[in-house]
Amino acid sequence: MPSITLEYMIMIPVLILQIFLFPITASVIMNTWADSSMTLELQETAGHMGSSIQQLYYTMNHASVPNGTMTITLDTPPLIQGHAYTTTLSHATNIDTSLQIMNVTLNLIGTRDQTSTLVTLGQNVDWQENLAFNSTVHSLTLVAQKTSNSIWLYFGDT
């Protein structure tokens, strides 16, 4: 017959371990979930921005659109879970095609989270290399300026 003292000697350390183990485990799980959620929202924003850029380019590139300027307001969130982010537009390198491919990179300020998306555009488009802006800029617009044989993309602030 086991003694009660032996049971206490086994169970007390197990109970003390559970007191520390459960909160640590919950904290790790919640931090992982928060990081994943932030990364997904950043990827969604990058995809939305890439899609908007591509739609603006294809609209301006259509033969029925005369030379001139078209502006769209980017409806992107200023903060992602309390963090501002920077967006950088650059030319994709080492791609064997005559098309211009834009690399849209988003970096969360204050974290290591970063995502990028590639946007396929035509041959007649260009933009300033490493064109960047901060998400906290109010009323950020994307501007496409069409001339007879090219389209120039840049950001504006209205």
Image (cartoon, rainbow, N blue to C red):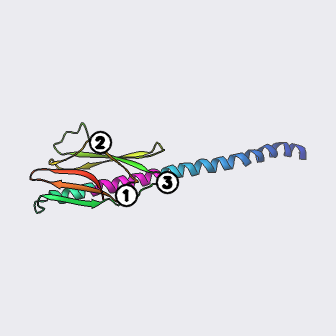
What's the CA distance linking mark 1 and mark 3? Answer: 16 Å
Q: Quadrant of residue 128?
A: top left
Q: Secondary structure at mark 2?
A: loop
- Mark 1 and mark 2 in contact? Answer it, CB < 8 Å: no
**Farthest-out residue, left:** 148
Instruction: Quadrant for the C terminus, please.
Output: bottom left
Q: Secondary structure at mark 1?
A: loop
- Picture disc at residue 154: none
Q: Amino acid at mark 3?
A: Gly
Q: Which residue lies under the disc numbered 2?
A: 130
Q: Which residue lies under the disc numbered 1?
A: 138
What's the CA distance linking mark 1 and mark 2? Answer: 20 Å
Q: Amino acid at mark 1?
A: His
Q: Quadrant of residue 139?
A: bottom left
Look at the image and say whether residue 49 sits in the magenta stretch: yes
**Majority secondary structure of the magenta segment?**
helix
Look at the image and say whether residue 80 sits in the magenta stretch: no
Q: Residue at x 27, y 61 (%)?
A: 72
Where residue 95 appears, x then y in whole percent? 22, 39
Nearer the observer, disc 1 or disc 3?
1
**Residue 103 in sight from this viewpoint:** yes
* Sequence-first disc among 1 and 2: 2
141 left or right of 150 in image: right
Q: Nearer the viewer, residue 78 or 90?
A: 78
* Sequence-first disc among 1 and 3: 3
Q: Amino acid at mark 2?
A: Asn
Q: Nearer the viewer, residue 59 or 17?
A: 59
* Magenta range: 38-52
Q: Which residue lies under the disc numbered 3?
A: 82
